[in-house]
Image (cartoon, coloured by chain):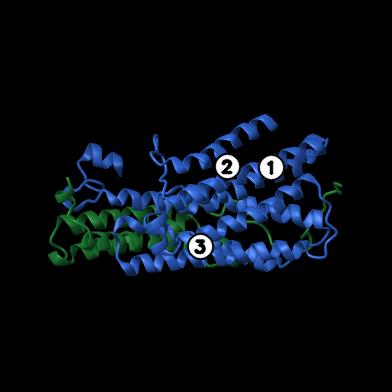
Chain colours: A blue, B green
Amino acid sequence: MLLLDRHVGMHFFTNDGGGNFMMYINLIWIWGHPEVYILALPAFGIFSEVIATFAGKALFGYRSMVMATLAICVLSFMVWLHHFFTMGAGADVNAVFGIMSMIIAIPTGVKLFNWLFTLYRGRIRFEVPVLWAIGFMVTFAIGGMTGVLQAVPPADFVLHNSLFLVAHFHNVIIGAVLFGAMAGYYYWFPKAFGFTLDRRLGIVSFWCWFIGFYLAFMPLYALGLLGMTRRMQHYADVSWQPYLIVALLTLVYLMGAR
Amino acid sequence: MMEEYTEPHAASTDHAPGVGENEPSGSRTTYTVGLAFALLLTGASFIVSQTNLLWEPGVPAGLAVLAIAQMGVHLVFFLHISTGPDNTNNVLALAFGVLVVALIVSGSLWIMAHLNANMMPASAIM
């Protein structure tokens, strides 16, 4: 469509001829929101495998797990406007997309409880993959809650483009996708290469990431609430300084501890 | 830790999309018939748009009908969508695709109509 705009004189994203540049944002997020679920759902699958294995039980509620995945697949196509509540659509548009964004937390919550019930009364062996999985459940629950908070359009008007949003995004993506990739890596490495990765180093690496994540992004939540926006190259409010220094030191911590 | 891999649903008839569906499902005749239908519909839409065969305000509607028929021909003869029981996955995937396209088109129209109604005309911002 951009190509047609540039070279064939069409007006999808320009203001002449009934076009609108906001259409670009609209279409980007129609693609972009299902995309984050494409990132997260395979990680959810890894956690289901890992948790069932190391709890020594069959996965709790397999059917509801599958139904939740399907529900997320469909709902993920109905929430994209929550990326631009502030663009100027009216109250009813914002309300519908806000409510849809809250509804998508329900199947995700179903999954979380299924994992919890799988662990419940299981004989849990605390191997490295299951550490990543439990770390994910804690971290992702926090990220999910800040997400539901931002799904409320009036709250989003306050938090839009703030570091609160940045912290939320990294909270769910690091918590789900990165932790999921690491869980799967430690879990299937022996199957792929015939030997198990060092347990001690694995545990060290997990705790560095788990603590490091909170050190890096909890200050950003606080900064977002204090009013700091994203992508600043300069800030005038010195009270923000300590939080940013903590977040910066985390980088040193994460790299040094590796 | 690693047990020997056993097929979890060996006894069940359930199988993943695409598994065991590799036998060619079309013959030369069906493809030829499909091509004939497709050419017929393409030709018809040119005739409808270039001549006075249809009542003039009805031409867009006529073209839309021919386009939908064309989609049907492609789905049945080239993509082998049928109502058979082995085809449920394909039909469901198609239905999901239709749902997503409907959501994208209707949602975008709704959102953009709201933006047009609520926001300053874009020409006034510039």
Residue A96, quarter of the rendered image? bottom left
Query: Which mark is in front, 1 or 3?
Result: 3
Q: Residues within 10 Å of mark 3 (few under 14, many from 20)?
A: some
As drawn, the label of residue A182 is 1
Q: Vertically, is A205 above or below A219?
A: above
Number of the label disc, if any, that sits on residue A148? 3
Q: In front: A106, or A200?
A: A200
Cβ atoms under marks 1 and 2 closer than 8 Å: no
- Residue positioned 22% across, 58% down in the render: B119
State how far apart marks 1 and 2 are (Cα).
19 Å
Question: Which label's residue is closer to the chain start, 1 or 2?
Answer: 1
Which residue, given by chain and number where applicable, does mark 2 sit on?
A216
Amino acid under disc 3: Val
The chain letter for the residue carrying disc 3 is A
Q: Quadrant of the C terminus of chain A?
A: top right
Q: Are marks 1 and 3 on the same chain?
A: yes
